[in-house]
Image (spheres, helix red, strand yellow):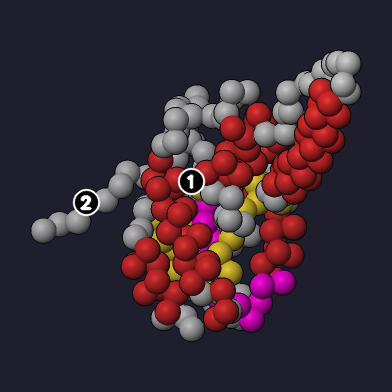
Amino acid sequence: MTPVRMPDCRWPRHYRSGFFGGVPTADSPVANIGRIPAQRVTANRSGDGMQRTGRQLVLGSVLAVILLGWQLTATAATELATPQQLRTILDREQGNVVVLNLWGTWCTPCLKEIPDLVALAQEFADRGVAVIGLGMDEPDTLAGLVEPFRAKHFPDFRTYLRDAPDMDSVVSVVDPAWNELLPTTYLIDREGNVVKRIQGKRSREQFRAEIEALL
């Protein structure tokens, strides 16, 4: 039987609803984290009500601080990367096998393979393998779209977002002949050489076999 291949993605004329139901909104869990309902202190004759409400305010404040700290950490997880910064990121990984995955929030095959890449990053973490994402969304969507999307759906996915007016200028760091198809994954050996370009969705087993061949 001929295996069914997922269609590749090209840059869309307009964003489409993604695999997980589209762009996070103000009603999503990500947007609502850290919103603690206001509480009012009301006194009664015994004072118990004020004490209870005061404790609730203290606990609510502590929870708000914890959630705010978590939110700030998550927001900082995805960083912009210029072509030079991407080169520096890859140079620092020399000595490791690198799996560089190009993806976009609008690309359904991309979103379906990211969980497998995250699982492989954890599986090979102690064997010198680094899995790095590079988002192809517009740079100005970092805070409003890309990072909330990553934090909600792929919180363990290490990824950057292109910081360049066009996709090719960043991807040319590893592939000057890239044809703008997503997902595209590059396998880079321990010496920093790009040894393979994979286009289209692959299974976890297929990626595992490709990684094992470089170890």
Question: Is residue 68 visible in this depiction of the protein?
Answer: no
Amino acid type at image mark 2: Val
- Residue 50 percent across, percent down from the top left: 86, 24
Residue type beneath disc 1: Glu
Residue 144: quadrant of the picture: top right
Highlighted magenta segment, given as a residue range: 92-102
Q: Magenta stretch containing residue 101, yes or no?
A: yes
* Residue 156 magenta: no
Q: How many marks?
A: 2
Whole-number angstrom distance, CA of label 1 to CA of label 2: 22 Å
Provide the residue designation for mark 1.
Answer: 180
Which image quadrant for residue 197? bottom left
Residue at image coords 52%, 39%: 105
Q: Which residue is mark 2?
A: 4
Q: Residue at x 52, y 44 (%)?
A: 153
Indicate the position of residue 5 as horizontal and vertical percent values: 27, 51
Question: In the figure, is residue 127 to the left or right of 163?
Answer: left
Which of the two discs, 1 and 2, labels the residue nearer the N terminus? 2
139 and 193: which one is in front?
139
